Image (cartoon, rainbow, N blue to C red):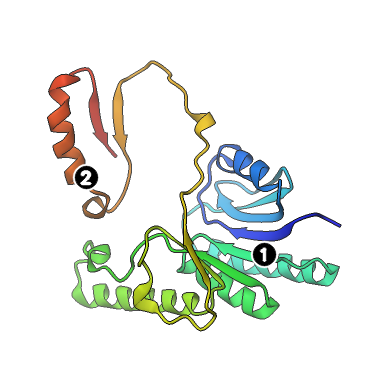
Amino acid sequence: MAQGKKIFFLSPGPKYNLEHVFSRRCEMLSKDFYGTVLTAGPRAQQVRYGRMDIHCISEKKPRSLKSTLGFLWLGFRYLRKAQKSGQPYDLFITYDPLKTGLLGAILCRFFKVKLVTEVNGDYTDDTIYMDIENPFKRRLKKFSMVNVERYVLKRADGIKLLYDGQVDSFRPFPRNPLISRFQNFVDANRFENLREEQVVLFAGYPFWIKGVDVLIEAFKIVAPKYPEWKLKIL
């Protein structure tokens, strides 16, 4: 009998290097947990780190319908196999309260597994949808995303936040879920000084939410003191 809780992670892609993304995280998790990670990437592959099995499905086009259906079908197969073996999953964890959260809510309801979802943004904020020019499409997208999030959160047994108060507009929660916030894992062992270009790289979207304007103003202040450094915005 395996020791610890059995967990299932639904983590969307694309993931280009499974070792860099999952190896250290899974090895640390394996001290107390075991289970499965379902993700997507440019090619199908299966690997194991610690006591966690990583199943990566082929996803040529990010966020495609094919990968969504693949997640649903494989999730169903994994949960059914675990249930039949007498070792069901204890937790089903999703990357967000939208697509992966909805898939998790469906599967958890069918197999009676506890659902934990991360909330990786404030989808009630109008600025999320500012890039959609058509006002009807903008309102429709916000309506659909907020209601999917509400559906998922109402069925969650655990909710991971970015900041306090993030989901207050969706209260009350009928399941009385455990709600907490903590830092995401970053494998700092992967960082090293290559002594190459001295560049500050920003990679994020949308700009007006990620604070690019603040970054530019701050860099303008320090740039005269450090003329060898450059700011690159991806």
Q: Residues within 10 Å of mark 2 (few under 14, many from 20)?
A: some
Q: Nearer the viewer, residue 96 or 77?
A: 96
Nearer to me, 203 or 226: 226
Q: Is 188 left or right of 205, judged from the image as shown?
A: right
Locate residue 90, reporting x and y percent: 70, 66
Front residue of 10 and 122 = 122
Residue at left offset 41%, top offset 59% = 120
Q: In this picture, is 231 found above or below 149?
A: above
Q: Name the residue carrying label 2.
A: 212
Classify mark 1: helix, strand or loop.
Answer: helix
Q: How packed is label 1: few (under 14 Cα within 10 Å), some, or many (20 or more)?
A: some
Horizontal arrangement in the rendering, residue 167 relative to residue 190 (left or right)? left
Report whether 80 appears left or right of 139.
right
Position of 179 relative to 59 (above/below): below
Q: Position of residue 154 (x, y in %)?
A: 49, 79
Residue 144: mark in rendering? none
Quadrant of image for the N terminus: bottom right
For the question of whether residue 70 can be seen, the reply is no
Q: On the rendered image, what quadrant is the C terminus found in?
A: top left
What separation in Å lies between label 1 and label 2 (alpha carbons)? 39 Å
Q: Percent from the top left, x then y, of residue 23?
A: 63, 40
Q: Amino acid at mark 2?
A: Val
The residue sitting at 52% across, 78% down in the picture is 176
Looking at the image, can residue 184 be seen?
Answer: yes
Residue at 23 percent across and 68 percent down: it is 126
Q: Are marks 1 and 2 in contact (CB under 8 Å)?
A: no
Q: Amino acid at mark 1?
A: Leu
Q: Which residue is mark 1?
A: 74
Image spot of residue 230 (x, y percent): 23, 26
Query: Which badge, 1 or 2, is on the more N-terminal residue?
Result: 1
